[in-house]
Image (tube, grey):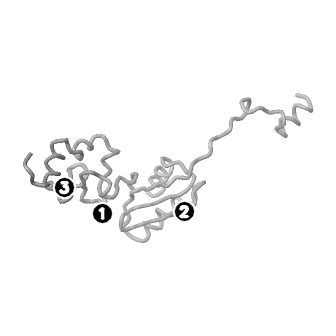
């Protein structure tokens, strides 16, 4: 290897994009929500510290009443979840709940969860095995809208 090859490799002037190093994708700003059981302030502190040192994390919020950890930053959600599980030794999963206003039938057996925080139900729109239980058929919708206050022709026999 000659002197010019050494200098060109060192400076990177003659290097094309496809040759030796590929450009890496920039990570997008993620809002990762994780459900972790926290009993005391020590657990809360341990969960928060487990992800604070990660590369790309910009903000960490802990809500112990809802057992919720929110991580904002340029991170991979799967890596955040595995880090929380590994560092804390606790069972952790992605936040499975959505506000009950979003789900068409929040009190269906698949959507309603007793362990959910107030005002939240399971996200049955994403979970395919529970989705058929929480969606109404056309005949159910027809009969429920007959007695609706929003229907001006309610209780009219067709």
Asked if labels 3 and 1 touch by Cβ distance under 8 angstroms, the answer is no
The quadrant in which residue 127 appears is top left
Which residue in the structure is indicated by mark 2? 59
Callout 3 secondary element? loop
From the viewer's perspective, tell me whether residue 147 is left or right of residue 74: left
Q: Which residue is situated farthest in the bottom direction here? A: 41
State the quadrant of the N terminus: top right
46 vs 122: above or below: below
Callout 2 secondary element? strand
Which residue in the structure is indicated by mark 1? 119
**Can you give x and y, in whole percent of width and height, for residue 56 in the image?**
60, 54
In front: mark 1 or mark 3?
Answer: 3
Q: Who comes first in sequence, dot 3 or dot 2? A: 2
Which residue in the structure is indicated by mark 3? 151
Q: Which residue is situated farthest in the right direction here? A: 3
Q: Which mark is residue 25?
A: none
């Amino acid at each position: 290897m000659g002197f010019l090859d050494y200098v060109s490799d060192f400076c990177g002037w003659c290097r094309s994009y496809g040759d030796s190093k590929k450009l890496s994708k920039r990570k997008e700003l993620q809002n990762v929500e994780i459900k972790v059981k926290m009993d005391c302030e020590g657990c809360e502190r341990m969960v928060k510290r487990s992800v604070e040192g990660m590369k790309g994390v910009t903000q960490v919020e802990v809500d112990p009443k809802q057992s919720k950890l929110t991580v904002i930053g340029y991170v991979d959600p799967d890596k955040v979840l595995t880090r929380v599980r590994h560092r804390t030794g606790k069972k952790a999963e992605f936040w499975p709940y959505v506000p009950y206003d979003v789900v068409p039938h929040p009190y269906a057996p698949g959507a309603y969860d007793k362990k959910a925080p107030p005002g939240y139900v399971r996200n049955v729109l994403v979970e395919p095995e529970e989705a058929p239980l929480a969606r109404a058929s056309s005949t159910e919708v027809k009969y429920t809208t007959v007695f609706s206050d929003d229907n001006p022709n309610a209780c009219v026999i067709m």
